[in-house]
Image: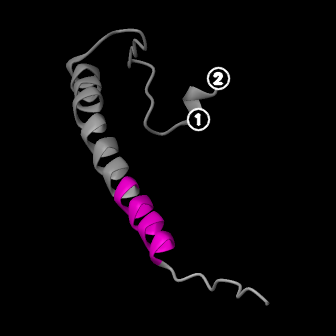
Amino acid sequence: MFFTALPCYHEDMKIQWNKVTWYSKTIALAIFIVWPFIFFFFGALYGSALQSDIDNFHQQKIPMRQSVP
């Protein structure tokens, strides 16, 4: 068996992969509470950077073609 080759695995360990523990609840809570704030922060940074690029583009002086008489 593959797990017997791992040094941290022991035959007496009964791992239940489908059991909900307080660790998994804490991680899920942290993900659903913290991640929206992180993505909002990065979205605000991206929006301000994009807006400054647009403002800089509109402030550039574009040479106009002179009309020939």
Type of amino acid under label 1: Ala
**Residue 55 falls left or right of residue 41:** right
Of all residues, the one furthest to the right in this rendering is 69
**Residue 8: where, in percent of width, then height?**
43, 37
Crowd rating for badge 2 (residues with CA inside 10 Å; few <14, some 14–19, many 20+) = few
**In which image quadrant can residue 12 be found?**
top left
In this figure, which residue is indicated by the disc labeled 2?
A: 1
**Residue 63 falls left or right of residue 9:** right
Type of amino acid under label 2: Met
Residues rendered magenta in the picture: 47-59
**Residue 31: where, in percent of width, then height?**
30, 31
Mark 2 secondary-structure assignment: loop
What is the distance, in whole Å, between disc 2 and disc 1 at their CAs? 7 Å
**Residue 66: where, in percent of width, then height?**
70, 88
In this figure, which residue is indicated by the disc labeled 1?
A: 5
Mark 1 secondary-structure assignment: helix
